[in-house]
Image (cartoon, grey):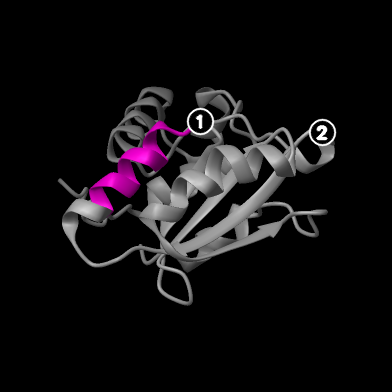
Amino acid sequence: MVEKHPSKVRVDAVDARILNWLVRDVSMPFRTIAAKVGIDERTVARRVQTMKKQGVFRETAEIDWVDLGTVTVAYVGCKTSAGDEQRAKLYKFISGQPRIVESFLTVGQSEYLLKTVTGSVRELREEVLMPMEPLTSDLSTSIISSQIKRPNYSSALSLLEV
């Protein structure tokens, strides 16, 4: 069975202000956020927990794979033939492949965009691309040589409709 995208979750102005502080420093104590937002610490904790359950907020380690220098980071774009069975096979491969660290359903040239981290270009080819070939079409790869902008979610929070 093909997974469906969950419904959109709405956040209010208080959630947006909490998120604004969390994206600046995910380790910021709830009491500090509470003081900055003007609410109590338990309310911050409850709202963060709710946003985690909804999938709005995830605490993750941000690793700069490119600067580590020992791996190959690549984005792989692809399409799949029509049919739930073929998509289910592709989703199963993506879910089970530890070298695929992020995956996206897109609108554009590629139907899917996958971020991969492998030990080498050869490993990318043998462990990710070759097994995907029978499940996809229009497979394209872009290997990252350097990052020119770090994620800046703080500025994007201003786009929320709250």
- Where does the image place residue 137, in percent across and percent down from the top left? 43, 66
Q: Which segment did they paint magenta?
A: 87-97
Disc number lying in front (1 or 2):
1
Q: Is residue 93 magenta?
A: yes
Mark 2 lies on a secondary structure that is helix
Contact check, label 1 and label 2, Cβ < 8 Å: no
Q: Residue at x 61, y 29 (%)?
A: 61
Mark 1 lies on a secondary structure that is loop
Compared across the picture, whether 132 is left or right of 125 comes to: left
Q: Is residue 4 visible?
A: no
Query: Which residue position is annotated with label 1?
Result: 98
Three-letter amino acid code at the position of disc 2 = Leu
In the displayed structure, 27 sits above or below 62; it is above
Query: Which residue position is annotated with label 2?
Result: 68
- Label 2: few (<14), some or many (≥20) within 10 Å? few
Three-letter amino acid code at the position of disc 1 = Pro
Q: Residue at x 37, y 23 (%)?
A: 42
